[in-house]
Amino acid sequence: MLKIAQVLKSNGTDGGLLLSFFDVSPEDIDLQEPVFIEFDGLPVPFYFESFTRRGNNRAVVHVTGVHNLKDADELAGASVYADYFEEEDGEDLTGWTVKKADGSVVGTISGYEDIPGNLCIYVQTPGGEVLLPLHRELIVSMDPEGRSVTLTIPEGLL
């Protein structure tokens, strides 16, 4: 999952939430898919009931199960995640470029290894194929248009 937004605050008395988006445009959000809001350290799935853009990177949303000010206030400051490892057309990240946090190119994603609780990607590098963890805390950014993902790669993995 990729951190796509932050709940800034409640909005109104009917459970509205003001979200600020990171590296994902609000129009790229699939309203039919769940988002996950971190609550007590766990990702809890929610579906958008309404979505109104506010500027370039913000939106006022209503999500399932949040229908009053008290519930909305409990989510203020929470992180919002979405599963962005598959695009709308079913294409996965295979073929995407992997970059280090400093911008240097590591290689190209050639496949996946779905280890329970730890999704990993095979990356074809000039020195051969390496296996890297694809954990949300290591993802710096994703660029669907440029088909690249930037990672913080732990020392010794390359």
Image: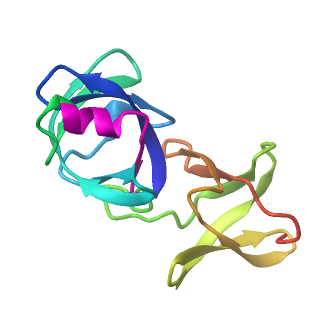
Q: Which residue is pictured at 76% across the width and 46% down the height?
A: 101
Q: How is the image coloured?
A: rainbow
Give the answer, above or below, for where 62 lies relative to 107: above
Quarter of the image for residue 59 reads top left
Q: Is residue 72 above or below residue 119?
A: above
Q: Which residues are magenta?
A: 70-83
Q: Position of residue 74 (x, y in %)?
A: 31, 39
Q: Is residue 71 magenta?
A: yes
The residue depicted at 30 percent of the width and 17 percent of the height is 54
Q: Residue at the spot x=76%, y=78% of the render?
A: 129
Single out the residue that lies furthest toward the front. 70
Q: Is residue 87 left or right of residue 12?
A: right
Q: Would you say residue 100 sits in the magenta stretch?
A: no
Residue 58 visible somewhere in the drawing:
yes
Q: Position of residue 24 (x, y in %)?
A: 44, 37
Residue at image location 41% in from the left, 23% down from the top: 57
Tell me the quadrant of the picture where the C terminus can be found: bottom right
Answer yes or no: is residue 34 visible. Answer: no
Image quarter for residue 90? bottom left
Q: Of residues 30 and 40, which is closer to you in this image?
A: 40
Residue 110: x and y in percent read: 61, 73
Left/right of residue 137 with respect to residue 93 in the rendered view: right
* Number of on-image labels: 0
Q: Position of residue 109 (x, y in %)?
A: 62, 67
Viewer-proximal residue, 40 or 97? 40
